[in-house]
């Protein structure tokens, strides 16, 4: 990963005075004055494979029905990393879609939101009318595949910037107010929480079932903690005891140390020799598909959640045909569960479901490339990485 100093983008304006730069974090909690919106801003611009540069670019203009968000917190997602490292998307772009912040300006016709509202935003929203929407496979909807949030260039989320433009169809159905007393960091988890909740619902878990979640990074813990709402026994597998300790804070008390335990054998031992009723693969790597299939009972379900790159994987066809195991996939968010996920993230925050405990590192925007580098090489000490334009130096969890 190339870590570049802040430069003026060719598309930006020159000579921005210091007084127009990003305000400090406490100012994010105030009601911003539209007159204070600067002409240019910092943004982490993707310029090519493994090349992310912090540049000055124009603050995006908004049109009727749109809003401008001043970003407080944006999580670094694995799909962002995939795009940066594989070159699957053209450059330049500004990624980042797990975004929470304050509305800095509204376009004409916006009625439900005002300047100063604290919000999180979904970057994809389906049309609700096409064939895929009628079949409730919303992530395959052509409208859903359009990105409705941008900080400039080709719309790509835009959360790795100081300001994000939210387009009208997202404002209408994908912009969510954050209640008082809920921090921006918690709100930034609403979108990934939705993706996980969608996957859990698609498994149709029952109370008497045993679930195994392979991988206990932030997504794995989200999946496992949500699964525990529906199934009595939830096993978690990971290489790092440190991650199991964090998972334990979410009531996940059946850990498997994958560094020296046989995961499939442990799943059978916990289920009277049958194997898990449902196995979720929350870690990238196609080799884990075999582990998951081996750990599932006959007639069980295996859900791939982290296998987002096209390729080939070795699968025993008889495990599907003869053993009647089902191999499923789940990708991105569902509009059907938006309200429920907002309720979980916002109301249950005050009752102990504090997702900010998953954050291990907070980076200022001018160190976005370092944040992406750390997120790309997870370790025992690193969990969720977030970028926060309002802070001046990195902050690690104690």
Image (cartoon, rainbow, N blue to C red):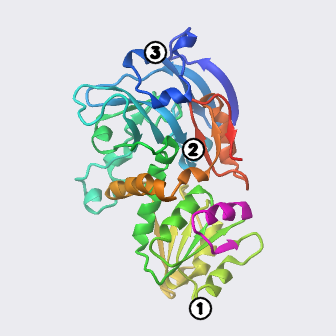
Q: CA distance from mark 3 to mark 1?
A: 64 Å
Instruction: Count the labels in the image.
Output: 3
Q: Which residue carries the number 1 mark?
A: 272
Q: Residue at x 62, y 43 (%)?
A: 85
Residue 240 quadrant: bottom right
Q: CA distance from mark 2 to mark 1?
A: 39 Å
Are the two marked residues, 3 and 1, in contact with CB atoms closer than 8 angstroms?
A: no
- Of 205 and 134, nearer the camera is 205
Residue 274 quadrant: bottom right
Whether residue 97 is visible, yes or no, is no
Span colored in magenta? 240-256
Of the numbered discs 3 and 1, the one sitting upstream in the chain is: 3
Residue 19 - label: none
The answer to whether 200 is drawn above or below residue 354 in the figure is below
Of the numbered discs 2 and 3, the one sitting upstream in the chain is: 3
Seen in the image, is 114 located left or right of residue 370?
left
Q: Which residue carries the number 3 mark?
A: 39
> Residue 361 at what x, y percent from top left?
66, 43
Q: Residue at x 43, y 72 (%)?
A: 203
Q: Which residue carries the number 2 mark?
A: 76
Residue 249 inside the magenta-drawn segment: yes
Q: Residue at x 64, y 36 (%)?
A: 363
- Of 229 and 74, nearer the camera is 229
């Amino acid at each position: 990963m190339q870590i570049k100093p802040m430069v003026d983008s060719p598309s930006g304006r020159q000579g921005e005075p210091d007084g127009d730069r990003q305000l400090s974090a406490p100012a994010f909690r105030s009601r911003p004055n539209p007159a204070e919106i600067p002409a240019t801003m910092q943004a982490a611009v993707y310029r090519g494979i493994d090349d992310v540069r912090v540049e000055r670019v124009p603050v995006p203009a908004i049109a009727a029905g749109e809003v401008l968000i001043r970003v407080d917190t944006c999580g670094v997602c694995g799909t962002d990393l995939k795009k940066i490292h594989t070159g699957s998307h053209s450059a330049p772009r500004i990624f980042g879609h797990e975004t929470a912040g304050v509305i800095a300006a509204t376009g004409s016709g916006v009625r439900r939101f005002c300047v100063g509202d604290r919000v999180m935003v979904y970057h994809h929203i389906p049309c609700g009318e096409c064939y895929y929407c009628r079949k409730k496979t919303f992530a395959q909807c052509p409208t859903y595949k359009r990105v409705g949030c941008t900080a400039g260039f080709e719309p790509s989320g835009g959360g790795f910037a100081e300001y994000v433009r939210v387009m009208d169809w997202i404002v209408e159905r994908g912009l969510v107010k954050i209640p008082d007393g809920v921090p921006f960091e918690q709100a930034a988890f609403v979108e990934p929480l939705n993706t996980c909740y969608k996957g859990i619902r698609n498994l149709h878990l029952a109370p008497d079932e045993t679930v195994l979640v392979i991988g206990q990074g932030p997504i794995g813990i989200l999946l496992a903690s949500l699964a525990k709402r529906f199934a009595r026994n939830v096993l978690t597998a990971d290489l790092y005891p440190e991650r199991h300790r964090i998972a334990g804070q979410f009531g996940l008390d059946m850990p498997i140390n994958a560094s020296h335990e046989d995961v499939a054998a442990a799943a059978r031992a916990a289920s009277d020799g049958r194997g898990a009723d449902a196995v979720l693969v929350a870690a990238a790597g196609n080799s884990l598909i075999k582990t998951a299939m081996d750990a599932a009972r006959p007639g069980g379900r295996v859900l791939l959640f982290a296998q987002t790159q096209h390729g080939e994987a070795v699968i025993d066809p008889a495990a599907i045909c003869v053993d009647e195991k089902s191999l499923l996939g789940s990708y991105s968010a569902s509009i059907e569960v938006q309200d429920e996920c907002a309720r979980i993230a916002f109301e249950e925050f005050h009752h102990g479901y504090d997702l900010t405990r998953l954050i291990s590192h907070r980076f200022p925007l001018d160190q976005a490339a370092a944040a992406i580098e750390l997120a790309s090489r997870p370790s025992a000490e690193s969990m969720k990485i977030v970028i926060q334009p309002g802070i001046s130096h990195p902050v690690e969890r104690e």
